[in-house]
Amino acid sequence: MGKKNESIKIACENRKARHDYFIHETYEAGIALAGTEVKSLRNGRANLKDSYAEIKNGEIFVRNMHISPYEQGNIFNHDPLRPRKLLMHKGEINKLFGKTREKGFTLIPLKIYFKKGRAKMELALASGKHNYDKRQDLVKKVAKRDMERALKERNRQ
């Protein structure tokens, strides 16, 4: 049968990633977090800007992801920028390792969300855009918005 209604709560999103990169594939990975990090994430106090994932010794880590210290935390609060381990199957990690060795591919976190009470990260295999690609995307976006606005105006009459 079909999937049951899974409740997904988005904790934070990297909106700039789709502007700066071509997204080729996306993957879901669990995140190994400390207790205070989970509480900060639930409060939406995280930032994925300038973060990336790298593979070392068959394990995958996310770097430069900022999770603010939990305000009600004590001396055992976490370091906001520490590298965090991502939880994926060994086969998936090996596949990603091979693809990131190709020219121009990198692993970029797109969003962090809670699924069935567990913190998950949507990870993208991406390649960088040049400035002219970004301008073309912007022109397309403006043209699409103008067409939708014109259709809306026409339907009102």
Image (cartoon, rainbow, N blue to C red):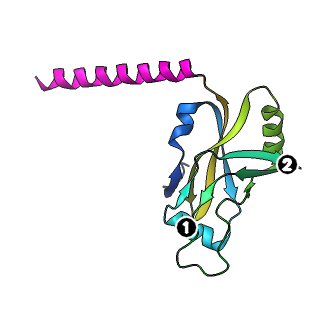
- Indicate the amino acid at tag 1: Ser
Which quadrant would residue 86 be assigned to in this image? bottom right
Residue 45 percent location from the top left of the image = 52, 62
* 154 with respect to 138 (left or right): left
Q: Is residue 33 magenta?
A: no
Dividing the picture into quadrants, the one containing residue 82 is: bottom right
- Judged from the image, the secondary structure of the residue bearing numbered disc 1 is helix
10 Å crowding of disc 2: few (<14), some (14-19), many (20+):
few
Query: How many marks overall?
Result: 2
Is the C-beta separation of discs 1 and 2 under 8 Å? no
Magenta stretch, overall SS: helix
Element type where label 2 sits in the image: strand
The amino acid beneath tag 2 is Lys
Q: Percent x, y for residue 24?
A: 65, 30
Q: Is residue 19 left or right of residue 55?
A: left
What residue is pinned by disc 1?
40
Q: Residue at x 81, y 38 (%)?
A: 95
Q: Residue at x 58, y 69 (%)?
A: 69
User: In x, y percent, where is residue 154?
Assistant: 17, 20
Residue 34 point in image, percent of width and height: 68, 70
Quick one: 81 or 107, which is closer to the camera? Answer: 81
Residue that badge 2 annotates: 56
Quadrant location of the C terminus in the rendered image: top left
Residue occupying the far left of the picture: 157
Judge whether 38 appears above or below 52 on screen.
below
Which mark is first along the chain, 2 or 1?
Answer: 1
- The boundaries of the magenta stretch are 131-157
The reply, left or right, for residue 61 in relation to residue 12 is: right
Q: Residues within 10 Å of mark 1 (few under 14, many from 20)?
A: some
Q: Which residue shows up at 23% across the image and 20% down it?
A: 150
Quarter of the view holding residue 155:
top left
70 shown above or below 136:
below
